[in-house]
Amino acid sequence: MKVRIDEDLCVGCGLCVNTCADIFEMKDDKAIAKVKVVPAGSEDAVKQAKDECPVEAIIVE
């Protein structure tokens, strides 16, 4: 599974960081994915962050 954030959509709410801090972090008031490939064991948290993102900025492939 791969993950990225559409920085044009991100509003910097930080919900993804609160949900999955090992994958997401805040940088310059926007969230970024610290990794491109989600490690085993973090898939459910990444899916939860994607589902909870208020602007649907998290892209999971």
Image: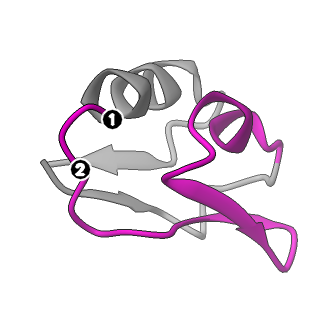
Residue drawn at (51%, 29%) of the image: 49
Answer left or right for 49 relative to 44.
Answer: right
- For the residue pair 29 and 11, the one nearer the viewer reads as 29
The picture places residue 1, in percent across and down from the top left corner, at 12, 47
Q: Position of residue 55 (x, y in %)?
A: 61, 37
Q: Is residue 35 magenta?
A: yes
Residue 27, given in percent of the width and then of the height, sits at: 77, 76
- Is disc 2 placed on a helix, strand or loop? loop
Categorize mark 2 by other alpha carbons within 10 Å: few (<14), some (14-19), many (20+): few
Q: Position of residue 52 (x, y in %)?
A: 57, 20
Question: What separation in Å lies between label 2 and label 1 (alpha carbons)?
Answer: 6 Å
What residue is pinned by disc 2? 39
Q: Which residues are magenta?
A: 13-41
- Residue that mark 1 sits on: 42
Name which residue type carries label 1: Ser
Report helix, strand or loop for mark 1: loop
Residue 14 within the magenta-colored segment of the rendering: yes
